[in-house]
Image (cartoon, rainbow, N blue to C red):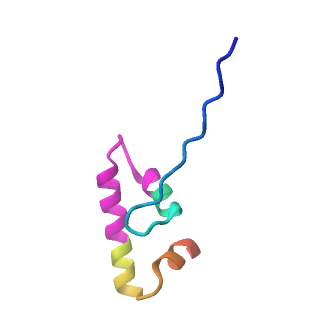
Amino acid sequence: MRRRRAQKRLIDPDPRYGDLLIAKFINVVMECGKKSIAERIVYDALDIVKEKHQKNLLKFFVRR
């Protein structure tokens, strides 16, 4: 007899922007459970994009 089904885990939004899509992207970039390094990579890249375009970053991230 099988046990219960596993419950879906909710993903918390990222701490800097409060966006769920960026949190999922950080989880995709993460390797070997090193989330702090993945966050640093993604946030540095988003800062570079923000400096160059001076637009709303979340709209830019979702649009591309």
Q: Tell me if residue 32 comes above or below residue 11 in the rendering.
A: above
Q: Tell me if residue 31 comes above or below residue 57 in the rendering.
A: above
Q: Tell me if residue 43 comes above or below residue 48 in the rendering.
A: above
The residue drawn where x is 34% and y is 50% is 35
The residues colored magenta run 26-45
The residue drawn where x is 35% and y is 70% is 45
Total marks placed: 0
Give the x, y percent position of residue 63: 58, 75
Would you identify the image quadrant in which residue 43 lies? bottom left
Left or right of 9? Residue 29 is left
Quarter of the picture holding the C terminus: bottom right
Give the x, y percent position of residue 14: 42, 60
Q: Nearer the viewer, residue 3 or 53?
A: 3
User: Is 12 covered by the magenta stretch?
Assistant: no
User: Is 41 covered by the magenta stretch?
Assistant: yes
Would you identify the image quadrant in which residue 4 lies? top right
Q: Main secondary structure of the magenta part?
A: helix
Would you identify the image quadrant in which residue 48 lies? bottom left
Residue at the bottom extreme of this rendering: 54
The residue drawn where x is 38% and y is 72% is 46
Give the x, y percent position of residue 50: 38, 81
Residue at the top extreme of this rendering: 1
Q: Tell me if residue 34 comes above or below residue 22 in the rendering.
A: above
Quarter of the picture holding the N terminus: top right
The residue drawn where x is 31% and y is 69% is 44
